[in-house]
């Protein structure tokens, strides 16, 4: 009998529904495997006795791991930060609610960059997560633990969040599939905020089929979230049997001098494969993309500065001891509770919002955001899907970029942040290897076209086996 921890979502549900294995046995198998591979540091905590799943859900018994950014009732929900190290959530995030309603079983909380600020998984109060393909390398971030856990098959699927590439970049580095839906498609209720105008929940799993099944369960309107799109629930697998033959636009800006030659070769080979299967490839341009990184870090840091002001040692979370003065309490609590990257972004955000600088930085960045969205809109007049690399390189070494110039780390998101600035759906799917490290193909769609993106990725995965490759170095 095939090991249940190597099975996809459809096979797990089939085997549970036929009585071949029970839901509790399935959850126990994944928890046991995750505990045995603790050197990955993919989980910040495991659920030793997973709850009995809700009967009747279409994903009954499928284990899922939640990124530590989603509140989960009765569970430490820390956002990988010391400032929330003792916070036990009194309620479930909307995403957690919906996975429970679908019959899924939560088996643990995955590691992440603190408050989702990072592109490597190294900015965590629990220590860095590690890439299963090479333990000396990063798994990407901020959804580092989710991607690493799925790649090592410590869980069949995991939730993630994507503010500027935090689902797609680690999915690329770890050789799995990850989708960031249209902004507002998945409720942010109960998802700890980094930058509210950018944050979006999504799914990381081995295949596009697995992602589509789980995204169908968690997407939909939520009146508790003011940014939630008033769109009905949707079956994101519905186009899988259709002959799409999409027109795929390839931006020249995605193949600049900063792109690793091996990564470029893998992506071009994937595009050739898609063309052979019936897609039409056309050249397009996104001229404003060169401003994306600058605009993104100005805007998200500004939002982070505002959102993180609530962590003051008074209302909830960590509180510095032995302080009588209120101002000193604020300062010491935040100094002790926040890590270096969070402090950096809060300071940048406070600066760009300060008197005399708001027009020079924040408002100008907002205008750039509009230009980038307009570029995408014009591009989609010529194509159905935009494709290119997810990241400019394969996974880099632990410590390689975290101790020097932070801008070098930020540039790892150069191909992903434009999508978030425009609020578009996008996914990353495995498309090859360079030096035994995975490469990701990024597919970008116009608003609310997740089903088309997933169908295109699913069709590609029918003709390739990159998403089926097992980790070369078992931890």
Image (spheres, grey):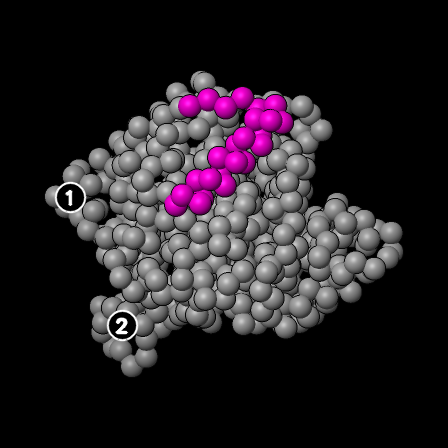
Q: Earlier in the sequence, mark 2 or mark 1?
A: 2
Image location of residue 400, percent across then percent down? 34, 62
**Does 162 sit left or right of 290 as displayed?**
right
Choose between 63 and 461: the one closer to the eye.
461
**Quick one: which residue is furthest to the right in this view?**
19
In this image, 266 relative to 14: left or right? left
Q: Which residue is mark 2?
A: 332
> Which mark, by number, is residue 183?
none
Residue appearing at x 46%, y 22% in the figure = 282
Q: Which quarter of the rendering shows the N terminus?
A: bottom right
- Measure the alpha-carbon separation of dots 2 and 1: 27 Å
Q: In this picture, is 121 found above or below 457?
A: below
Q: Nearer the viewer, residue 50 or 453?
A: 453
Judging from the image, what secondary structure is the residue with disc 1 in? Answer: loop
* Circle 1 Cα neighbour tier, 10 Å, few/some/many (<14 / 14–19 / ≥20): few
Write the residue at 64% across / 33% down. 459
Badge 1 is on which residue? 357
Q: Quadrant of residue 341?
A: bottom left
Q: Is residue 327 magenta?
A: no
Q: Position of residue 425 (x, y in %)?
A: 49, 35
The magenta span reads 260-283
Residue visible at 62% across and 47% down in the picture: 467
Q: Secondary structure at mark 2?
A: helix
Q: Looking at the picture, does residue 289 appear above or below residue 195?
A: above
């Amino acid at each position: 009998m095939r090991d249940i921890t190597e099975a996809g979502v459809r096979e797990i549900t089939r085997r549970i529904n036929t009585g071949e294995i029970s839901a509790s046995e399935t959850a126990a198998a994944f928890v046991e495997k995750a505990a045995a591979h603790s050197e990955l540091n993919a989980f910040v905590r495991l659920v030793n006795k997973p709850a009995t799943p809700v009967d009747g859900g279409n994903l009954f018994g499928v284990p899922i791991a939640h990124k530590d950014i989603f509140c989960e009732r009765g569970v430490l929900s820390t956002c990988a930060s010391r400032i929330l190290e003792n916070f036990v959530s009194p309620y479930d995030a909307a995403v957690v609610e919906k996975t429970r309603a679908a019959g899924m079983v939560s088996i643990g909380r995955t590691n992440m960059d603190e408050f989702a600020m990072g592109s490597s998984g190294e900015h965590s109060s629990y220590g860095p997560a590690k890439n299963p393909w090479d333990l000396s390398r990063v798994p990407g971030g901020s959804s580092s633990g989710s991607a690493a856990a799925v790649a090592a098959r410590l869980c069949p699927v995991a939730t993630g969040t994507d503010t500027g590439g935090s689902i797609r970049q680690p999915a690329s580095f770890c050789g799995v599939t990850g989708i960031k839906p249209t902004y507002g498609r998945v409720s942010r209720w109960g998802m700890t905020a980094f930058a509210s105008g950018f944050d979006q929940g999504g799914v990381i799993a081995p295949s596009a089929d697995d992602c589509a099944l789980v995204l169908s369960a968690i997407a939909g309107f939520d009146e508790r979230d003011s940014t939630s799109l008033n769109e009905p629930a949707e079956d994101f697998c519905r186009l899988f049997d259709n002959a799409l033959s999409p027109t795929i636009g390839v931006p020249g800006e995605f193949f600049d001098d900063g792109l690793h030659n091996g990564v470029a070769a893998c992506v071009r080979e994937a595009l050739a494969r898609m063309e052979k299967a019936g897609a039409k490839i056309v050249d397009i341009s996104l001229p404003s993309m060169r401003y994306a990184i600058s605009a993104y870090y100005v805007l998200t840091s500004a939002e982070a500065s505002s959102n993180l002001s609530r962590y003051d040692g008074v209302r909830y979370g960590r509180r510095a001891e032995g302080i009588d003065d209120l101002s000193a309490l604020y300062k010491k609590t935040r100094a002790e509770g926040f890590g270096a990257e969070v402090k950096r972004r809060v300071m940048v955000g406070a600066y760009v919002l300060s008197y005399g600088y708001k027009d020079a930085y924040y408002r100008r960045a907002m205008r750039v955001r509009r230009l980038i969205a307009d570029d995408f809109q014009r591009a989609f007049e010529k194509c159905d899907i935009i494709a290119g690399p997810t990241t400019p390189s394969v996974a880099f070494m632990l410590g390689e970029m975290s101790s020097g110039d932070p801008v070098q780390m930020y540039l790892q998101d150069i191909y992903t942040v434009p999508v978030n600035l425009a609020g578009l759906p996008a996914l990353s799917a495995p498309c090859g290897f360079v030096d035994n490290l995975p490469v990701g193909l990024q597919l970008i769609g116009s608003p609310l076209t997740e089903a088309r993106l997933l169908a295109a990725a699913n069709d590609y995965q029918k003709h390739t086996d990159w998403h089926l490759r097992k980790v070369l170095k078992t931890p």
